[in-house]
């Protein structure tokens, strides 16, 4: 394996606005990080070959973050760009079926490169291919989220790409910026980094307007911010600044910090940590707080369950809801639906996302979690509603608190 040597230490630049000198930034503090890698970084535009020497430095950055306890997810472009060379496809726009064929060839090469570099350090790599429907259709969203959570819990690094080989024009993202934001939302990541061929957001296209001003941080995505978006300068990638702004809206809405940074330099993540120029989009709340706000105010419960006094006390103490404390169900609901939690007197005391359907809940209510597998024939969650998926309500119905430890996923499920 070739190792790139750097003869001098990188010069430390002033930190981005909003991140004071000596204070950790969002990337330094991230516990769960999604990194999106653009095609223009992974694939040499002249040869169509993988830029392996650069990828090695990115892997070194990822391993360093992993050693400090950060969970990592990669969203990687590059499959189509790699595959088209092997198929002899001409430069320029491809038809959908040509893109799908190129993706089928390039994806296996891309996955092999990540596997080889990361497993050399005894890190397991998992390939996950998603389509737009996987983050929009409720059941598929829940399945994708559960898979990613399991991979992270087991210590693997998921490498995600859009499933270009089967996605039609109607169910495609078309760019991995928004896919990365949906993945960050889905997994309650607290930081998303878009490594690109640009170093951030400008007031105008800097390639056309020498007077364009660099925007170091964005606290709110206004129409003026959206108007600053231009088109991609790369012939390899499919995403422009407009798709990055759209991704930022998804990410910050889920409580996730998002960064746009130039990735072509060696060790691109380390450069961000040491103050390289980049644009940070700042959320108003944490991923868990954003999720709880979504549960409390955005969703309409489709069913309800009654709980006993013991369960009510446990919920008010910050515990999850176990089947043993449930005394009855109302209405029809499926796993992943939002339901109301009612006291014995019929007062709504909480609202949350059910781990089981109404029929399954009726079979396991009043029983211990250890009995679930025998009662249902499969092993599911020990909790009927996990505390991270639940909001305790005031008597008026308002949310009592949006804070909690941990987190599972963000909103966006139909």
Image (cartoon, rainbow, N blue to C red):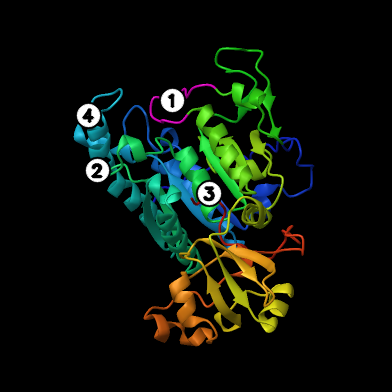
Q: CA distance from mark 2 to mark 3?
A: 32 Å
Q: Tell me: 60 left or right of 87.
A: right
- Residue on which disc 1 sits: 234
* Percent coordinates x, y for residue 173 in the rendering: 41, 38
- Residue on which disc 2 sits: 105
Q: Nearer the viewer, residue 324 or 252?
A: 324
Q: How many C-alpha atoms fall within 10 Å of the one at disc 3: few (<14), some, or many (≥20)?
A: some
* Residue 197 seen in this snapshot: no
Q: Tell me: 211 left or right of 174.
A: right
Q: CA distance from mark 4 to mark 3?
A: 37 Å
Which disc is residue 412 wearing? 3
* Percent coordinates x, y for residue 71 in the rendering: 55, 59
Examine the structure image and report whether residue 160 is included in the region drawn in magenta. no
Q: Nearer the viewer, residue 228 or 403?
A: 403
Q: Give the mark toward the camera: 2 or 3.
A: 3
Image point (64%, 25%), residue name: 223
* Percent coordinates x, y for residue 350 in the rendering: 67, 66
Q: Quadrant of residue 384?
A: bottom right
Image point (68%, 36%), residue name: 11
Q: How many C-alpha atoms fall within 10 Å of the one at disc 4: few (<14), some, or many (≥20)?
A: some
> Which segment did they paint magenta?
230-239
Image point (49%, 86%), residue name: 370
Which disc is residue 89 wearing? 4
Q: Secondary structure at mark 1?
A: loop
| First in residue order: circle 1 vs circle 4 | 4
Q: How would you classify the magenta stretch by its main secondary structure?
A: loop
| First in residue order: circle 2 vs circle 3 | 2
| First in residue order: circle 2 vs circle 4 | 4
Toward the left, the furthest residue is: 87
Q: How many C-alpha atoms fall within 10 Å of the one at disc 1: few (<14), some, or many (≥20)?
A: some
């Amino acid at each position: 394996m070739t190792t790139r040597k750097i003869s001098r230490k990188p010069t430390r630049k002033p930190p981005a606005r909003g991140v004071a000198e000596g204070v950790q930034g969002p990337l330094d503090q991230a516990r769960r990080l999604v990194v999106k890698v653009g095609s223009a970084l992974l694939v040499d535009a002249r040869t169509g070959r993988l830029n392996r020497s650069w990828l090695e430095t990115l892997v070194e950055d990822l391993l360093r973050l992993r050693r400090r306890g950060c969970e990592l997810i990669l969203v990687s472009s590059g499959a189509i760009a790699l595959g088209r060379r092997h198929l002899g496809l001409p430069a320029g726009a491809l038809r959908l079926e040509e893109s799908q064929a190129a993706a089928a060839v390039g994806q296996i090469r891309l996955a092999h490169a990540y596997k080889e570099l990361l497993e050399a350090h005894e890190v397991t790599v998992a390939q996950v291919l998603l389509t737009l429907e996987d983050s929009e259709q409720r059941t598929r969203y829940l399945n994708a989220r559960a898979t990613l959570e399991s991979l992270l819990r087991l210590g693997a690094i998921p490498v995600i790409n859009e499933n270009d080989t089967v996605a039609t024009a109607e169910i495609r993202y078309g760019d991995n910026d928004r896919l990365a934001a949906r993945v960050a939302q889905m997994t309650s990541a607290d930081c998303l980094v878009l490594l690109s061929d640009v170093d951030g957001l400008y007031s105008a296209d800097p390639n056309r307007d020498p007077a364009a001003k660099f925007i170091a941080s964005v606290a709110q995505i206004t129409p003026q911010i959206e108007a600053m978006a231009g088109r991609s300068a790369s012939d390899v990638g499919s995403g422009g600044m407009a798709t990055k702004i759209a991704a930022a809206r998804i990410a910050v809405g889920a409580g996730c910090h998002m960064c746009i940074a130039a990735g072509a330099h060696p060790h691109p993540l380390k450069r961000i940590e040491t103050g390289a120029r980049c644009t940070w989009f700042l959320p108003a709340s944490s991923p868990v707080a954003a999720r709880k706000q979504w549960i409390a105010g955005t969703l309409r419960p489709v069913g309800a369950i009654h709980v006993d006094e013991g369960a009510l006390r446990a919920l008010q103490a910050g515990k999850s809801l176990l089947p043993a404390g449930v005394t009855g169900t109302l209405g029809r609901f499926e796993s992943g639906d939002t339901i109301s939690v009612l006291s014995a007197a019929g007062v709504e005391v909480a609202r949350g996302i059910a781990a089981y359907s109404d029929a399954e809940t009726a079979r396991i209510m009043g029983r211990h979690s250890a009995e679930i597998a025998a009662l249902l024939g499969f092993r599911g969650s020990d909790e009927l509603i996990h505390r991270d998926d639940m909001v305790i309500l005031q008597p008026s119905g308002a949310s009592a608190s949006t804070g909690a430890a941990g987190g599972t996923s963000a909103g966006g499920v139909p």
